[in-house]
Amino acid sequence: MAEAEVAEKVRMFDIYIMDKHYEVPEGLTIQTALEYCGYRLIRGCGCRGGSCGACATVYNFTHDPTLRYGLACQTAVEQDMCVVQIPCFPTAKPIYDIKKLRPTVDQVLEIYPDLATCFGCNNCTKSCPQDLEVMDFISAALRGDFPTVVEKSFACVMCGMCSARCPQGLSPYNIAMLIRRLHGRYLLPRSKHLEDRVKEIEEGKYDAEYEKLRSTPMEELRRIYDERWIEPK
Amino acid sequence: MPYPPFMEESIRKLEVSRQRRMKEEIPLISSDERDIIVRKYHPDYRETGKRKLLLGPNKDETMPEELVNQLEGNSRVDPDKVDLSKIDYDVDVLIIGSGGAGLSAALVAQENGAKVLVATKLRLGDSNTIGAEGGTQAADRPNDSPVLHYLDTMGGGHFENVPELVWAMARDAPMAIKWLEDVGVNWDKETDGSMRELELAGECRRRVHSCKDYTGLEVMRVLRDEVRCRDNIDYIEFEPAIELIMDDEGQVAGAILVNLETNELSLVRAKAVIVATGGLGRLHTQGFPTTNHYGATADGLAMAYRVGCSLIYGDSMQYHPTGAVYPLQLVGILITENVRALGGQIINIDGEQVACNLEPRDILASFEIRECTERHKGITTAARNVGVWEDIPLIDMIHGEGTIARRLPSLVHKFSRFNIDLIHEPVLVYPTLHYQNGGVRMDANAATEIPGLWVPGEVGGGVHGRNRLGGNATLDIYVFGRRAGREAAKYAKEVKLGKLNLDHVRQWREELEQLGIAKERPFSPMLLPNYARQPGDYLAALYTEKLQPGLVKLA
């Protein structure tokens, strides 16, 4: 028997939005709690699904001052939570032409000289709402180990929290961005079969076959479709 | 135990049937059988929640009422109060929207010599693209061809796709993948550089390229970074367009933008306008939750409709069969189709498969709705949401330990925040509003019927027929975004703009008033949904009468 039992009374939590007290029912995220309290969001709301970093939030608890960092859309509200959103943080993003860059540490340091001033405080790792090992990929960057930078920064949603907390003014998320692009363009081997296919298409290899299908009567087209061989997974 | 005790019996049944189900192959139903099941169970075919359009190019056609409200909506702008001689930005190409289509268009337009302005409602890159997980189709393997890709897409769309558009997409697909490779995207590859490709529902070959399950995020990060690095591409954030500007030659000549935070208008004069505003998930058609981002409110559809563009398949919505149902905090979010491509099965309360897990999305959604309604074999949560299981742990059993962690890290992470371990536990899923299959009618370069206006990406219609295949949306955007960018830049070099006007707004207002519906209809574009709990009404009448002029209400 799997009949759901709806709770007679929904549990309410005390939370604090920018130090102001509100009561919200359980089952909400920080984002939907803000809306429950009457805030209509303009800043600090994006994909609502944990992928874009718009809703980066700093929070702690009345009984525990340790700062924690989360995405408002993916963090459940809890009793005594105190929240503040950081929808934007100033960084100076350098301009570069990816086609003219070298995939080396020296090149990265030319564009981001701050990288060399990292003293390993680990604030960046502690402030990442995606639980990334930011310090590890910054070290990997300094070592020139770009594949590790890619691996460890892949889930970065570019929210800027690491930059906000870095005492040396680094933007780890921008540094990783550059390195991931260098890796994708220069360090991953090019796909040969892709190049070959592009050439074939440009030479018009498939145009005649398409024309034939285009002028095939609907019933015949459906039959061709239903009977086409499907590659096993 | 992340699931409440009353669900445990069903989970036990699922675990018991697992070994047998690993070898169980349910055949795909035929294209005729598909037509039958969608008509019976798919939300598009429900009798309620829809209405006939009373005016405009698609007059008398029936579409979801939420969309009809936007299409029939009032302009926010009084043409007599806007001074079109006070232009704030004068550019070659204005791009409205900054997702995959908008930014692809921006880069290619710039490469073709255009001065580009990207205006976007939220931050640069905030879009549906960024949340895309599964991947991008392209027929680049030796045993595949763009013709097979074309055939798959036609079949998935119930053969109602516009053939020229499908061919443009299938043909340009490998070029789009290569372009992204060149600009620095980290596609999943083997050590020799060959692409690691998946086969999603409705496809006869493995041709979906992905970046783990962060595909949209990876590509958007790169495109956004590149746009920021290019000369001659400017962008403005938090300034959505609320109206297109026309000229006296019937050409689109720019747009009116509004600053969401200050209500101030910016007038843009542009030789060419690319509307890349994406989808409409936040309209919640048929009351469904959505996978879409906050700004997906059909803005481009409403503005294009008002200047005389017609829509195709405006009544066709894609409900993704695997939207999360539990916990409450995650309702509606996307669980990628890659899970099914890797072997994840859809299971009812008795531990049995609901259908072949690789039926195209509309078919599987229909099967799930039948299972939970007519057959009463769904699982109901304490919050009264219903769903079926998606058996994710099967994936490691089929492909080896570590596969789930390696191929679906984003998903594993999201559910781990709520103590659900995808390596050992199934998830509850149900259809969620995901994509608008149709849109503004366009040609193979995403050009509309009105000169000077392009509609690449989800806002454009005809490519996907009545059901889009997985992996084709994040292809549509790059292919048509690039084509629109190229064509708009070319057009901008030659066009001569006439005198700017907002006559279409006057005409629209007159028509609404003649029909007697002006006061009943909302303002469109909606811009943002309103999820904020509203206080009761307490305002004095004098206060509402004296509301300040120039206030652009998001209402």
Image (spheres, coloured by chain):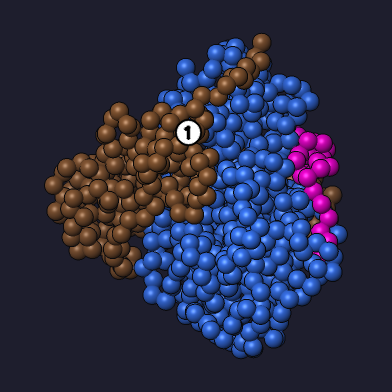
Chain colours: A brown, B blue
Residue B509 placement (x, y as % from top left): 75, 71
| Up/down of B304 relative to B126, above or below | below
Instruction: Say left or right for A74 vs A117.
Output: right
Is any atom of residue B204 visible in this view? no
Is any atom of residue B54 visible in this view? yes
The number of callouts visible is 1
In the rendered image, residue A179 lying in the magenta stretch gets the answer no
Q: Which residue is drawn at 59% across and 74% down?
A: B255
Q: Which of B146 and B544 is in front in this view?
A: B544
Assign the C terminus of chain B to one quadrant of the image: bottom right
Instruction: Say left or right for B249 vs A184.
Output: right
Snapshot quadrant of residue A16: top left
Instruction: Say left or right for B503 vs B543.
Output: right
Q: Which of A62 and B307 is in front in this view?
A: A62
Residue B390 placement (x, y as % from top left): 58, 27
Q: Nearer the viewer, residue B186 or B95?
A: B95
In the rendered image, residue B34 lying in the magenta stretch gets the answer yes
Q: Which residue is drawn at 28% across and 63% down?
A: A92
| Up/down of B451 relative to B396, above or below | below
Instruction: Say left or right for B193 vs B325.
Output: left
At label 1, counting other C-alpha atoms closer than 10 Å, the crowd grade (few under 14, some 14-19, many 20 or more) is some
Q: Residue at x 73, y 35 (%)?
A: B366
Residue B277 placement (x, y as % from top left): 59, 61
Q: Which residue is drawn at 52% across and 20% down?
A: B3
Q: State which chain disc 1 sits on.
A: A
Residue B536 placement (x, y as % from top left): 62, 44
Residue bearing the label numbered 1:
A23
Identify residue type, mark 1: Glu
Snapshot quadrant of residue B417: top left
Span shown in magenta: B28-57
Q: Is mark 1 on a helix, strand or loop?
A: strand
